[in-house]
Amino acid sequence: MTTALARHWTHSTHSRRHLLGGTLTALAAPALLAACGAQPAAQPGLSQEAKPTTLEWFGKLKGVAQNDIDAFVQQYKTARPNVTLNVTSVSNTAEGKAKLTSYAAAGTPVDVVSTFVSIPTLRTLNGGYSLNDYVKRDKFDTSQFAQNTMRGVEVKGKILALPHAYAGNELVFVANKSLFQKYGVPLPAADWKNPWGWQQFREAMKKLTNFTTNPPVAGTSRFGTIYNVPPMWGARWTSEDGRTILADKPEMLQAWTEYYDMVVKDRSTRFSPGAPADMGGENASFLAGKGATLTICCAVPTTTVLFKDQGIDWAFIPFPKAKEAVADIGGTVIAIWSQTKAPDESWRFLRWSIEEGRLANLEQRMPSQTKAIEPYVQKFYGSTPDVRPNLLLQAPDHGLPPDALWQSPAADQADAAITAAFVDVGKGNKTVQAALGELKPQLQALLDQYRD
């Protein structure tokens, strides 16, 4: 059984390499297209050198229509006629990372990577190119991103990437309004400052759960990750300096005890012990009317469009608040690969991709630029105010505070260790205290192994 703790990036593998150019199909999304024939203004501080250059771009573009990719490339060709983008589309999986590793080892050119890599991946592969000099030279405004988002791409004072969009395992929380009405549970206020308290949330989930009806209903199909549960109670996995594991702290014990009391004692989740075997998966159970709430990852509109197809009356709701209300949301990044032979042109492409939410729009993700978020939300939800899109608009302000464990090269191993330690807790066969006691030395060893 998949728990809510596991990562929710489960894209199938699809890699392809193209040299793109020539006559290309126009993109459907208006936000991606410049005015016909318009020449974009020069970016401040960037050289206007027109030396012919080919950039090798590895991007997570699976699921994006090829004509949309072509139009994106053509738009950049209009902005920089001397540059040819050679696009390799990879998936957000270990296989995609392995392909990048093999390219780097073989000396195959790589200049820019986006979305499928993270700060830990860049550090593990020694693939991050420090952007500090470019940021300083061009007076690049980093305040255009939410503070926690920008902090998430900085390690020991070095900016290793820029956030071009928002991603995460639990960006937003949604409710099936019909089930709320059926079980007499009012929606929480459409206000991040006035969400359910934790106990209110638990009571609501219990009222919404009925495993004896046909179809059975769980209070939530998915809620809670190893990333956002601790900060809800003010807990951190590591100390501020990233040197010490804090799994034994009282606030960490409280966070996971409260969470698993909901899962195991209340039995109000799809993944609770005793939940019917035919509940289905995370999204599938919500789409089938078997889950009253659901957290959504990745590109939110690609999931919510399915609600309309299934005739589900739904709305955004704020995450519940213990000490804080916290969404598992952070920046998905675009970076210059450390082995690039064209760092200046790569930097130019980074800036252009971020501006006006260009790359985010191509991926249908929420843009990272604060000024681009409202147009994005308006584009997808402006005609449906009843879904309460203001909660999506404000979600980045409630994103994860940076934790050194998730910036470390040990991040993937730590994720696997924590998830494994909690398997028996989720079944009711192990205490939270025992799991955290096992984890402290394991995670400390990982931190020490990768200390630099």
Image (cartoon, helix red, strand yellow):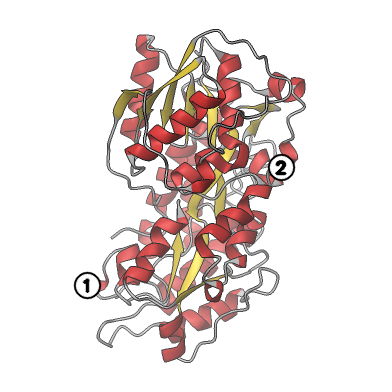
Amino acid type for the residue under numbered disc 1: Asp
Amino acid type for the residue under numbered disc 2: Gln
Q: Which mark is residue 136?
A: none
Relative to residue 308, is residue 83 drawn left or right? right
- Which residue reaches farthest front? 37
Residue on which the image places disc 1? 278
Q: Residue 211 occupies which quadrant of the picture?
A: bottom left
Q: Residue 267 occupies which quadrant of the picture?
A: bottom left
Residue 369 in percent (x, y) is at 64, 44
Between residue 398 and residue 429, name the one nearer to us. Answer: 398
Pair 2/1: label in front: 2
Q: Secondary structure at mark 2?
A: helix
Rate crowding at label 1 as few (under 14), some (14 to 19) or many (20 or more) other CA atoms within 10 Å.
few
* Up-down relation of residue 181 to residue 310 (above or below): below
Residue 324 in percent (x, y) is at 67, 63
Residue 64 in percent (x, y) is at 36, 42
Rate crowding at label 2 as few (under 14), some (14 to 19) or many (20 or more) other CA atoms within 10 Å.
few
Q: Quadrant of the N terminus?
A: bottom left
Residue on which the image places disc 2? 144
Between residue 279 and residue 268, name the one nearer to us. Answer: 279
Residue under the point 41% across and 13% down: 109
Q: Quadrant of the C terminus?
A: top right
